[in-house]
Amino acid sequence: MTVYGVHTGPQKVTTGELVELWQEVERLGFGWISIWDHFYAADMTGDAHCHEAVAIHTALAMATTKVRCGSLVYCAGYRHPAVLAKAIATIDHLSGGRADLGLGAGWSQVEYDAYGIPFPRAGIRLDMLEEAAHCVRGLLREDETTFEGIHFQLEKARLEPKPVQARLPIWIGGGGEQRTLRIAARYADGWNVPFISPEEFARKRGVLAQHCAEAGRDPSEIRCTINLGLAWREEDLRPQFGNIAEMVRPGVLMGSEEQVLDRIGQYVDAGAEQINIALRAPFDVDGLRRLASALAL
């Protein structure tokens, strides 16, 4: 059964507006709400109005009662994975066992540079992602974790109390076929990619399956999901996505209700087990209600 969720961008918005949105999303019957990890708005405009991810993830857990509380995704270069794992375990307790942890390699150089965080080449950022995934998996699930990596080290590290969930889901975000999908095949319970066509989603899912075979994993163990924009009218696209509007267009639901539902069906046929609407301020709550009604949530 397909799960429908909402990925809420905490940029250019107040915390009160976010809480109101989350509670409405839950009331509408969506099963998932997630946040992202950026210091600047994720639209390449240079706008710095964006709330911090761990704090806003905590607020999400406290403001809701039923939905899964996800993160798509925490940047592996912004926090030591042990610090992040500790925070997520606490968020899981606050939510009563509804938290998910997503990890990614990071991409927005403007915020790295502004905050004085080194922005290494992609290969190094992916190395950091792989090491971080190894660390958080051990900390969240094992009694004790020792790890000697290039970027992160753990020495008989214990995380207590453990999350409420015995196996708190770990997600890997991104579509890179050589490294990211291989990391997902090794460490992920869920894989997420944003704003690509159904055909491209199906192709990348096939690449993930190949990496799973090489890693000795059943690909059905990894929940395959996509984030899609929602713009019922053409003029709704750019206010949400700013300078990346054309880049995300292949993964934006547009047109009539029939057209939107048909497009969603194409993603489901391509193997999407969960579809998240990537909602950014100015939030089109009426448009989200229209979608929920069309989906009969």
Image (tube, rainbow, N blue to C red):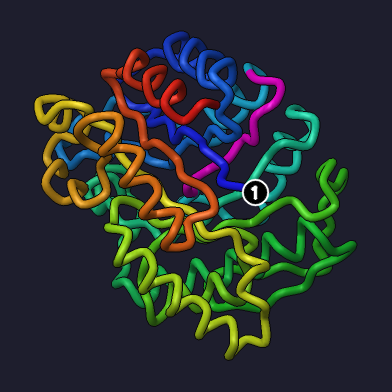
Report whether 127 appears left or right of 49. Answer: right
Tell me which residue sits at (11%, 46%) in the image.
246
Count up the numbered dots.
1
Tell me which residue sits at (67%, 67%) in the image.
221
Report whether 252 appears left or right of 293. Answer: left
Question: Percent x, y for residue 146?
Answer: 77, 73
Q: Main secondary structure of the magenta part?
A: loop
The one of 270 and 34 positioned closer to us in this rendering: 270
> In the rendered structure, does residue 3 fall within the stretch colored magenta?
no
Q: Which residues are magenta?
A: 64-73
Residue type (three-letter) at the residue carrying disc 1: Val
Tell me which residue sits at (86%, 65%) in the image.
144
> In the rendered structure, does residue 68 fall within the stretch colored magenta?
yes
Question: Percent x, y for residue 156?
Answer: 83, 68
Which residue matches tag 1? Answer: 83
Report whether 108 appears left or right of 209. Answer: left
The one of 118 and 180 positioned closer to us in this rendering: 180
The one of 154 and 54 positioned closer to us in this rendering: 54
Asked if residue 202 is positioned above or below residue 231 in the image, the reply reads below
